[in-house]
Image (cartoon, rainbow, N blue to C red):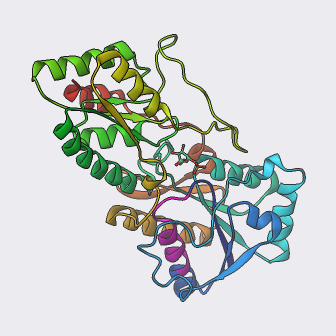
Amino acid sequence: MKVAMLTGGGDCPGLNAVLRAVVRKGERHYGDTLLGFRDGWRGPIEGDTMPLDIHALRGTLPRGGTILGSSRTNPFKVDGAPEKVVATLAELEVDALVAIGGEDTLGVANRLHAEHGVSVVGVPKTIDNDLSATEVTFGFNTAVQIATDAIDRLHTTAESHDRVMVCEVMGRHAGHIATWAGIAGGATMVLIPEEPFDIDEVCEAIRHRHEDRERYASIVVVAEGATPKEGTLELVSGEVDAFGHVRLGGIGQVLAEEIEKRTGYESRVTILGHVQRGGTPTAFDRVLSTRFGIAAIDAVHDGDFGSMVALRADEIVRVPLAEGVGELKTVSPDLYHGVAEVFFG
Ligand code: F6P
């Protein structure tokens, strides 16, 4: 078969490992010809391709980013673009497409399959881990490890200066990275989108902690999408992308200023930003990406189009793409209230 691949949306550690696995099993086991589309959905719209074979993927397993490039291009926002994708696939005689992405990229894959009959298999990626059909997406483990390492480092400098350190992490509208890194890093407080916070309560917990111990320090981990309870703190919202998502980031700064103003404790902010998405994947993410890649090329050869590979109870399974992109996975209250919160203050 002739199998094409693309990587869309924000990059994430492990993308190259998926490409490598698809190519390896596709070429060696099935005798496929592989090719890549550059920059997400822009590639098939414009017919921008690159050849992929075992040789081209050498050395990419530990490499972050994606050798195919990525973009947030949404074909359903450009006149005639879905038809162009279909035409490119026909012109290049592509039998199947493996789309690697998060809810946006896979949402497009789902529509192209349902509305235009494109033979596509999805692979879930995102550091945000917010796809409900899979227990975990690759990239999340790496992001959590990077955030945890940063929090560990912030602890020692915070303690030396008796400061409040606010650490802003990514995750969009889900607080998985914040909750996991907060638990792993021993945060004083974790603020997530799922649980609107009250700045008075945050300050009270910090005050109590510092007064109680004479000289201490606090680490507040805040997810970029965390929101204050209505009417308690003003936030300015950012621009919107092709999928209608607002660009997040900056709540950490507002929070640190507010905490300092209200408590009198010197506060600083660290916004981890894209550091969480860059660099080498952890061993866990390399293995998960590899398993997903193998499962995706197997799904292609089973003709199981319109499906997405997913991890459930440590098994790789297939679910309909529609299910894969249907619901946002948020942080379980058991983990947040039952575990993270026990260590607040
Ligand atoms: O979805 C992954 C993610 O890193 C989010 O956590 C974040 O809000 C967004 O992408 C940032 O996007 P960009 O790379 O376009 O700034």
Residue at x-position 90% and y-position 54%? 80
For the residue pair 338 and 343, the one nearer the viewer reads as 343
Q: Quadrant of residue 84?
A: bottom right
Q: Is residue 300 above or below residue 157?
A: below
Q: Relative to 285, is 165 on the left or the right?
A: left
Q: Quadrant of the C terminus?
A: top left
Q: Quadrant of the N terminus?
A: bottom right
Q: Main secondary structure of the magenta part?
A: helix
Q: Is residue 142 above or below residue 47?
A: above
Question: Does the segment drawn in magenta span residue 22?
Answer: yes
Q: Position of residue 21 (x, y in %)?
A: 49, 75
For the residue pair 187 and 255, the one nearer the viewer reads as 255
Q: Residue furthest top?
A: 231
Bounds of the magenta segment: 11-23
Q: Position of residue 31 (x, y in %)?
A: 60, 87
Q: Residue furthest left?
A: 213
